[in-house]
Image (cartoon, rainbow, N blue to C red):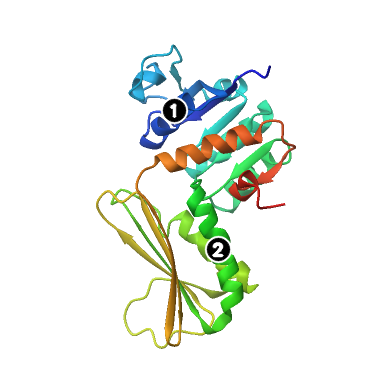
Amino acid sequence: MVDDMKIGVVGCAGRMGQMVVRQITETEGCVVAGGTEPAGNPAVGADIGTLAGLEPFGVLVTDDPAAMIAAVDAVIDFTVPAATAEHARLAAQAEAVLVAGTTGLDAKQEEAVTLAARHVPVIRAPNFSIGVTLLLALTEQVAGILGPDYDIEVVEMHHRHKVDAPSGTAIGLGEAAAAGRGVDLDAVRKSGRDGHTGARPSGEIGFATLRGGDVVGDHTVVFAGEGERLELTHKAASRQVFAAGAVRAALWGRGRPAGLYSMKHVLGFAD
């Protein structure tokens, strides 16, 4: 009989962290075995279950990610870029599966995640929703079929507190569209328009960002051609879909060889 997978949650007191904790407790085959917050955070020393609105289960929040990650089988990270890069290094040292949903990493931070994947399974995605994973695949396929005669715009909306724009998911959708066309996104990307911009260049992939209220995450990829328009849309009503995907990814990663994986691998439609 295989023991329950011990999962640690960095940033366990945040909104997403609490959701992940609740999802782990509701999922067969895994347990919450640790959680961290930065030193000085008032949640340090509190029971992780209590913070998540559950009955206390005797696992306390710590400010020592190295010790926590060393004691678990997998770590789930929805934090900030600098922290994710360090957690990747620690996961590699501890031989723990890393599930990373943080977006906005710079080149050096991305390199830290890539290096970790040489030693442990790293499941990385801009969005762990099953629906968004399918949207990414469809976007790549449709972009390849329609070709450059159709203009592509990625429109996203999130709550007023989101600090990065475009969202990591929007950029992922742009990358999927670019891959479908066989081009580099950086060469055709246009983020926002203002003033007298002139006519839209052929082949451009545009991004529009909306912020307001408590929107969890809406993403639409628009393919606009002459005489018709195709729109692929995903709307998230709860962060629970992200937590469920992340926990599913952690369980999938158990026993896998070291490597950099995506939710496409978890869902079984990537090599």
Residue 43 drawn at (x, y percent): 36, 23
- Residue 239 is drawn in which quadrant? top left
Seen in the picture, residue 80 relative to 134 is either above or below; the reply is above
- Decide: few, some or many residues near mark 1? Use Cα within 10 Å; few <14, some 14-19, many ≥20: many
- Mark 1 lies on residue: 21
- Quarter where residue 58 is shown: top left
Q: Can you identify the residue that label 2 sits on?
A: 138
> Which amino acid type corresponds to the residue marked 1 in the rendered image?
Val
Label 2 crowding class (10 Å Cα cut-off): few <14, some 14-19, many 20+? Answer: some
In the rendered view of the protein, which quadrant contains the N terminus?
Answer: top right
- Residue 86 versus residue 142: which sits nearer the camera? 142
Q: Position of residue 45 (x, y in %)?
A: 39, 16
Residue sitting at the far top: 58
Query: x%, y% of residue 226?
Result: 45, 87
Residue 134 visible at all: yes
Q: Residue 99: percent from the left, percent from the top?
A: 57, 38
- Residue 59 shown left or right of residue 180 in the figure: left
SS assignment at label 1: helix
Element marked by disc 2: helix
Residue type at mark 2 is Leu
Residue in the image at 34% along x and 47% along y: 237
Whether residue 175 is visible to the viewer of this picture, yes or no, is: no
Upstream in the sequence, badge 1 or badge 2? 1
- Residue at 59 percent across and 34 percent down: it is 250
> Marks 2 and 1: in contact by CB < 8 Å?
no
Residue that lies at the very extreme toward the left in this rendered image: 213
Look at 46% across and 60% down and name the residue there: 170
Query: Which of these two is toward me, 118 or 263?
Result: 263
Determine whether 5 is above or below 179 in the image: above
Viewer-proximal residue among 51 and 252 = 252
